[in-house]
Image: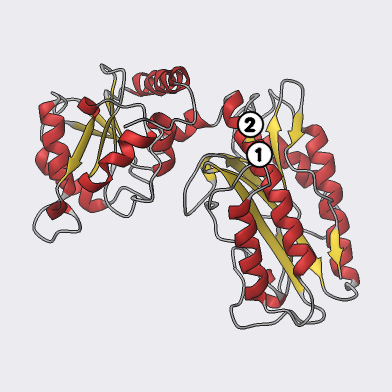
Amino acid sequence: MESQLRFAKEEFAERIRRTKELMDHRGIEVLMVMDPGGMNYLSGYDGWSFYVHQGLLLSLNDDAPHWFGRKQDSNGTRITTWLDEDHIHGYEDFYVQSRYTHTMRYVAEVMDELGLTKKSLGLEMDGYWFNAKMYQELIQKLPGARLMDATNLVNWVKTIKSDGEINYIREASRICERVMQTAIDNIEVGVMEKDVASMVTAAQIYGTEEYGGSSPAIFPIMPTAERTSTAHMTFHPDRKYQKNDVVILELAGARYNYNSPLSRTMYLGEPPADLRRVSDVVIKGLKDTLEFVKPGISAEAVEERWRSNLVGTGIEKPSRVGYSFGLNYVPDWGEHTVSLRPGDKTILKPGMTIHFMPGIWLDTYGFECSEPFLVTETGCEKLIDFPEKLFIK
């Protein structure tokens, strides 16, 4: 069965090396990776099978990680990864969502066969894909192991993108431009919100004439009217666009699960003066902050520069204004590492991709205008070419 790798084996080897370096620094001898984005990053595994327990076991003493997952998904490992048969472990179906046994018991048996049961074991304890029951089972079945927190370890390795990864993010950016234009072109008074949402979703999958898209890690965020006063609301399935609607669009393109997100705001009618003022302040601050970004400065310095643009405007932004993004699956394209906010001392480095997202949510409406950027050797590169303005129809 021929593998369909998206990157050369040498790149995966470098990712493994960098991950092991961080493991060794933290005193972790074996790392269990259950985040689908981390699994993909280290092995290439790409399947919609994360609703059951699956993951990788990476030992400092092995050049390749061991995949474990549902046996019927094992061929997905052979198709999408660079792993050999000795590193593929499929469990029988009686483990799936069982009331009588647990998948971590199987994982403990695999670790015993590999001689890993008395090692320090890093776990993604604050991740979406690892839970209290798993931890409880591992404590019981691995009494000789030292269980350690390794939350976001792989994500920190992922923050610096290779040239190949940046290429996929650029392709995702081209898709995102078409997706955003699709939304803006089709939103009109009297049109059903669901109809435009379906066009947006179709555009995300269609991609471009040259290449197709993946399903982004976040469903299209397309609230209207008072629903724009809060973050992360999607479209209303039974509502038509109305005159004087504020419409927020937080959309993304994705290419092989490499996401590129973008936010813009529309108004259907003549915008009120306060919305125009918010728009002017945010966009001015956005442009000024992007000019300030360069390698060697801290994440909190970027946020401080943004905040300086709000002085005297009466506008406040208490939440963070950006985060690292890239390769990921649902429910989030963010990497849960770098955040543009006070207290984050992370130094920006070339190869980082950051979504600068100064969203403003007020009592009755919101405004968003964001930019994903790549940190370069001398500054930053805007990844998406789309007008920075309040769109009016």
Specify the label residue 47 is tagged with.
none
Q: Nearer the viewer, residue 324 or 10?
A: 10
Q: Amino acid at mark 2?
A: Asn
Q: Is residue 353 above or below residue 262?
A: above
Does the residue at mark 2 contact the one at mark 1 (Cβ under 8 Å)?
yes
Residue 196, image x, y percentages: 68, 70
Does 389 sit left or right of 340 as displayed?
A: right
Q: CA distance from mark 2 to mark 1?
A: 6 Å
Q: Is residue 49 above or below residue 63?
A: below
Specify the label residue 167 is tagged with.
2
Q: Which part of the image, by quadrant, shows the N terminus?
A: top left
Residue at x 62%, y 74% (from the top left corner): 194
Q: Which part of the image, by quadrant, shows the C terminus?
A: bottom right
Q: Quadrant of residue 356?
A: top right
Specify the label residue 171 is tagged with.
1
Packing grade of label 2 (10 A; few <14, some 14-19, many >=20) is some
Task: Provide the secondary structure element on which disc 2 rests.
Answer: helix
Packing grade of label 1 (10 A; few <14, some 14-19, many >=20) is many
Would residue 142 be visible to someone looking at this image? Answer: no
Q: Nearer the viewer, residue 219 or 368?
A: 219
Q: Amino acid at mark 1?
A: Glu
Residue 89, image x, y percentages: 20, 36
Residue at x 49%, y 26% (from the top left corner): 7
Q: Is residue 392 above or below residue 102?
A: below
Number of residue marks? 2
Would residue 348 be visible to someone looking at this image? Answer: yes
Residue 292, image x, y percentages: 80, 33
Residue at x 73%, y 79% (from the top left corner): 191
Does 333 sit left or right of 146 as displayed?
A: right
Residue 81, image x, y percentages: 37, 31
Q: Quadrant of residue 372?
A: top right
